[in-house]
Image (tube, helix red, strand yellow):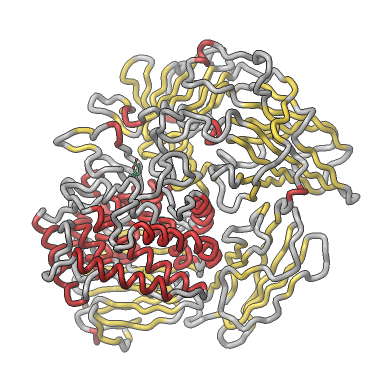
Amino acid sequence: MTPYGLTTEQLTEPLGLGEPRPRLSWKLRSDRRGAAQSAYRITATAEDCDHVLWDSGRRMSDETLLIAWDGPALQSATRYHWRVEVWDERGEPAGTAQSWFETGLLHRDDWTAVWIGRDPVSLPPVDPPTDEERSFPDPAAAPLHLRHVFAVAERPVRARLYATARGVYEPSLNDERVGDLELAPGWTEYHRRLQYQTYDVTDRVRAGTNVLAATVADGWWSGHVGFDPSRPARHYGLAPAWLGQLVLDFADGSRRTIATGDGWLEGAGAVRAADLLMGEFVDARRTPVLRPVAVLDREPGPLVAEPDHPIRITGDLPATRVWQPEPGRWLVDFGQNLVGRVALTVRAATAGARIVVRHAEVLDDDGRLYRANLRRAQATDTYVSAGAATEVFEPRFTFHGFRYAEVTGYPGELTQHDAVARVLHNDTPFTGRFACSEPMVNQLDANIVWGQRGNFLAVPTDCPQRDERLGWLADAQVFAPTATRNADVSAFFARWMRDVVDGQDDDGAFRDVAPVLVLDREGAPAWGDAGVIIPWLLWRTYGDRRVLERSFPAMAAWVGHIHRHNPELLWQHRTGNSYGDWLQVEADTPRDVLATAYFAHSTRIVADAADVLGLPSAEHRALHAAIRARFIETYVGADGTVEGGTQTAYLLALAFDLLPPELVEAAVEHLAADIEKRGNRLTTGFVGVSLLGPVLTEHRRADLAYALLHQEEFPSWNYSIRHGATTIWERWDGWTEHGGFQSAAMNSFNHYSLGSIGDWLYGRVAGIDQAPDSVAYRELRLRPTPGGQLTWARAEQETARGPVACGWSLDGDRLTVTATVPPGCTAVLEIPTCDPGSVRENEAPVTARPSAGGATLRLVSGRYTFTATY
Ligand code: RAM
């Protein structure tokens, strides 16, 4: 057994960490069955210091996750190396592994940089916009180009750039871009927290003259965000600004800091206009005309180190098809609805040639870009050529949701090799894999994953293309379980949770969106509840106790807020915009049923969280029991009917345990009857949809869950796939044969909410889950569920404790089940066999306990293949 995959604060070798007591984790690898850790020892040193700073000593513990630094207080801007040594279950030494983290600037005094930008009351711009540039929507000032020349006698032995922006920025050193971060510093409640980034530029600083520069565009700070036309832009501030500090350490031990401030120059460069929603305008002929900057603010403000995976380009997609519907108008298909931008290679253009790229997710019936659903977002990039032999145009301060691009003004013939789609999102490691025998289900999984890629950009957004792109809470909470299957989103959600908590009002109400920009009132049922559900999910999935601890007061305050305004225990007041089961079809789930179900659910989570944190929970337990009783007495009939009679009403009551045990079966029958009478069709919206697969399967109606999965008629996932979907649509009826496009006022083709079924594909179809009290998959519950048209399915999921896998295949009535259990974990595997006596491993009989689902086996860590009669 050996340790591997070391992380600090859930990140691999993070540069510029802000946590004063970062938490260290590792995984274990072994070929031996039953391998487990019995003890560990952590030792840590600081760079340039020989003695051991922290030695945990040998701790008799099987814990591998999030062990808090217990050494001396960390210094700023210092690299710490740490090593973990482990002992296995026999007490034998089982290897060591090492890693490092580097602190950022931990104290206010570390910052000497001040905010610089363009003097807001300056004389006429030195470099006024042309008429053409003026046509850019709501022209804010051209993005800032900032520059500073400095000289050093010799090369430093270490150089770090710490930087952030009010806006979005890209730094450069000696006219070459620094780092690979995009749209930094991302989006947070800026007035509460602004993230700075750390770059290692040791190899980039040279002896002699150097130029440190940055380009800063409006971004979320002062550009268009969201849909509120009365506040078209400049939500946080009027204009962009930059703050940067280059720290140089020399061989003789001296240190020099080059910081933004007086003496820097600014001017508009080639990027003439840039906006996240509108697009970018680049005139490659332009070089900056410089003048002194204005110091805008001497106080750095609420700076925090970036705590999660930054936004990056994570892949390129080639054009799959290029055609010219009419002379001069090219259309490019990238074969995938995605989020990012197009990099266009232009050859032999005359200087001043103007090339325009417009984006769309779908084509209309006439084969043109369908852009009405983008609403105010213009998603248009313009490039004015410098006239060089070859130029590559790639906008840097905007992003679009698109599959198709239209290019006009392109000189010569546009070929498939000239256009590349660059995929952009928070670089959370995508390590989950699901596959099965049905291509359409695999396509559904791909659509779910692509929806996550595109919408985990700065915050978990509802959609990436129209003038919205907000961190909607319900969307996030219904999809979060699926997201954790596909990728490691631990740090991403933990960071966003701070915005959710910051957004809470004085009465304890979470809002509908975070950061709060619009919708300045209490969150709706199932929306505000994300503030309770997500921290709990992060605890259960990743063992992140700190996020639970930090969120707990806000979680309890939310439940307190609902309770205070609804002393009768039915959540009928203060329901905000009460969206109900948003975008349900042919169903109308009563809002108070949905709301009260969530009131109960959140209250129970708060009680469970209190238990985990060692806080009193009795009051919340009692409150939960009382809400549950009220729910039953008010909404549940003696025959097991639930008020409203919709699929979602039953799903909520069943999933949240809001039925007397003796009525559960009847409620399942009512639910099943509703699905069946519609010819195996669903009616659920955002809220109910995530429960369909899990609830039906739990209550032995996996057959119906599969019927919904395979349904190809409207409304269904496959209906969208049959009509070309490569991401999850916002609405079941985004486009239908009978109605064409839904209203363009709200019709995104890349909205992950209805993709929350992904959790069930992993959890029940392939079978990876954890026991109800297990944390971070320590006690696995593996329940592969053959069914529907599938002949095999399998999933592999990288958990915090290592890869977990489960899968099955059927050959006639011969069932094969595979499972992987990481060291230190155990599993209960349910093999769906009609004959528990038929279970074999390597042809040898295995003793399995007969159980309701077939045969049950207890497994220690290892890799397994069993066969049985189905
Ligand atoms: C839409 C958003 C989001 C949803 C809300 C209620 O505008 O796209 O998905 O949560 O409305």
User: Quadrant location of the N terminus?
Assistant: bottom right
**Residue shown at 30% from the left, 43% from the top:** 729
Total marks in image: 0
On the rendered structure, is 720 left or right of 520? left
**Percent of width and height locating residue 684:** 23, 52
**Residue shown at 38% from the left, 41% from the top:** 463
**Nearer the observer, 155 or 674:** 674
**Percent of width and height locating residue 640:** 14, 69
User: Quadrant location of the C terminus?
Assistant: bottom left
Q: Is residue 734 visible?
A: yes
Is 547 placed above or below 318 here?
A: below
Furthest-top residue in this view: 131
Is 695 placed above or below 297 here?
A: below
**Residue shown at 41% from the left, 45% from the top:** 521
Furthest-left residue in this view: 677
Is 177 placed above or below 381 here?
A: below
On the rendered structure, is 640 left or right of 654? left
On the rendered structure, is 771 left or right of 611? left
**Percent of width and height locating residue 554:** 49, 59
Is 806 placed above or below 592 here?
A: below
**Percent of width and height locating residue 338:** 40, 40
**Nearer the observer, 35 or 109:** 109
Q: Is residue 343 visible?
A: no
**Nearer the observer, 644 or 423:** 644
**Nearer the observer, 809 or 196:** 196
Q: Quadrant of residue 638?
A: bottom left
**Residue shown at 16% from the left, 57% from the top:** 644
**View quadrant of ligand 1:** top left
On the rendered structure, is 597 left or right of 206? left
Q: Quadrant of residue 751?
A: top left
Furthest-right residue in this view: 252
